[in-house]
Structures are given as C-alpha cells and as structure tokens.
Image (spheres, helix red, strand yellow):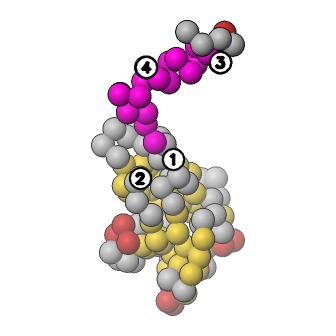
Amino acid sequence: MIKHGKPTKNGKVKLTFILPREQVPGATSVVGDFNDWDPFAHPLRSQDDGTFQVSVTVPCRQELRFRYLADGGVWFDDPEADRYDEHGGYLSPVTMGYVWEVPPSAAPAVSSLASVAHSGTAQ
C-alpha cells in the first residue's frame, strides 16, 4: 500500500510505503530515483499494527521510479505502482495527488460557469 499526503504549496508530497509483515523478507528498504537508489536511505520499520513502513517526501509534479530491496539482494515491486518495466515500478504525478490548480486569470470564467450550472442560465 502507498499512502499519499496532500501536496504542499512548495510542490512536495509525502508518500508512505507500507508492506504487510508477511511480504517483508528481512531488512527491506524502498529505493528509487528520489534517493539515488541508496538502500540505506529509507529502510522500512516495523509498526505496532504488523506492517513495515517508511515515509519519504518527493516532488509531486514528476514521475517517480522505485522498487523495494530486501536482504540478500532481493528486489521486488509494489503492487500499487502505476506501471512497471525492467527498472521497477512508477508513480505518476496524478497518483501522487498532484492536482492542476486553476490559474488566477481563469478564476472569473470558472465562477461564471459555476453560476450557469447552478442557475441554468448565462449571466
């Protein structure tokens, strides 16, 4: 499971990678382009609820590539990745909670459309 926080004003999002105890074959880390594939940067830690978790903060406007690395050099992918290739799983900006903001110049047009939708007539 991958939990997504709300994107911040500075374009970052907190992701929490969560694995059930039975999926963790010993010491395991989440590695990816966000930590230069460093297996020591983000180890999963045992939680009271029987899961292993780690949180990372990443840019929410770019695609993210990652995998899990366990003891003995065992690599595996997260079933919640958006897609996979020979390099691992990917998360897209949309999956990470990035929502396009309405530019200020478009705000009056959006308000007008909302008025039309509400009243059924153009103003």
Relative image position of residue 49 (x, y in whole percent): 64, 53
Seen from the viewer's position, the closer of residues 68 and 66 is 66
Looking at the image, do the residues carrying marks 4 and 1 touch, with CB atoms under 8 Å apart?
A: no
Looking at the image, do the residues carrying marks 2 and 1 touch, with CB atoms under 8 Å apart?
A: yes
Q: Is residue 3 left or right of residue 119?
A: left
Picture layout, residue 121 above or below residue 35: above
The CA distance from mark 2 to mark 1 is 7 Å
Q: Which residue is at 40% across, 54% downward?
A: 61
Residue 11 visible, this orientation: yes
Numbered tag placed on residue 18 in the rendering: none
Q: Which residues are magenta?
A: 100-116
Residue 41 visible, this orientation: no
The CA distance from mark 3 to mark 4 is 14 Å
The CA distance from mark 2 to mark 4 is 27 Å
Relative image position of residue 6 (x, y in whole percent): 47, 41
Looking at the image, do the residues carrying marks 1 and 3 touch, with CB atoms under 8 Å apart?
A: no
Relative image position of residue 11 (x, y in whole percent): 35, 46
Numbered tag placed on residue 108 in the rendering: 4
